Image (cartoon, rainbow, N blue to C red):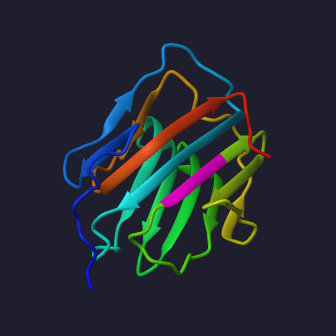
Amino acid sequence: MKPSVNPPAKVASSALFNGTTSRMVRTPGSAGNLTKWTFSCWIKNFDAGTLGGTFEIFSALLSPSNNELIRMIGDGSISFEYTLNISGVNKGLYTTKKLHRDPSSHYHVVISRNGPLISIEINGITITNFTSSTAPSENSYLNTTNAHQINRNTNLKGLMSEIYLLDGTAKS
């Protein structure tokens, strides 16, 4: 049985994305801590039947080859990824192993950086096994005065709520 694509009546502090054009962009007025931060959100994909996509949950983009991304990847199951690219070269990459769960469920995603250390927590469980794990060797694009975007590639048809970027704080 395919889950309903109708969103709940009201979810406080949330944003609904239509899967084609909706995204959120904010450019901070001043830079924060470039090596110590925590990003947190709840995410739900309403179109669970189309799991062949990569959803850019949160990104900071200087240019197409200079970016920092937090993504949800679906190809029959779900994984999450943190990546830092500088001049087209990967300078940091963490990809969780596939989470074999209901792809339409809510996920609470917490990713934090404390210098070269990256921590990923999904639904309250700290992930310790990764398919890829390369510690970031450069400063972050997150917390800079570059554009920060939620759902940059606009293909998420779903809900994100309780979205936070905590400057100078790394969840331990």
**Residue that lies at the very extreme toward the top in this rendered image:** 29
* Residue 49 is covered by the magenta coloring: no
Left or right, 41 with respect to 1, comes to: right
Q: Residue furthest bottom?
A: 1
Could you say which quadrant of the image residue 30 lies in? top right
Among the 4 quarters of the image, the one containing residue 26 = top left
Q: Is residue 39 left or right of residue 20?
A: right
Residue 133 as seen in the image, left or right of residue 18: right
| Image x and y of residue 166, in percent | 63, 31
Query: How far across and down, in percent of the image, does residue 13 sit?
Result: 41, 37
Query: Whole-percent x and y of residue 153?
Result: 32, 50
User: What predominant SS class does the magenta segment belong to?
Assistant: strand
Q: Nearer the viewer, residue 161 or 143?
A: 161
- Taking the spot 52% from the left edge, 51% from the top edge, the residue there is 70
Q: Quadrant of the N terminus?
A: bottom left
Q: Nearer the viewer, residue 106 or 119?
A: 106
Compared with residue 90, is residue 168 higher up or lower down, i.e. above or below?
above
Q: Is residue 43 left or right of residue 97?
A: left
**Total marks in image:** 0
Among the 4 quarters of the image, the one containing residue 38: top right
Residue 43 placed where, x, y %? 44, 55
Residue at (47, 26) in percent of width and height? 146
Q: Nearer the viewer, residue 24 or 14?
A: 14
Closest to the observer: 142 or 139? 142
What range is drawn magenta here?
Answer: 107-111
Q: Residue at x 54, y 36 (%)?
A: 164
143 to 159, vertically: above or below: above
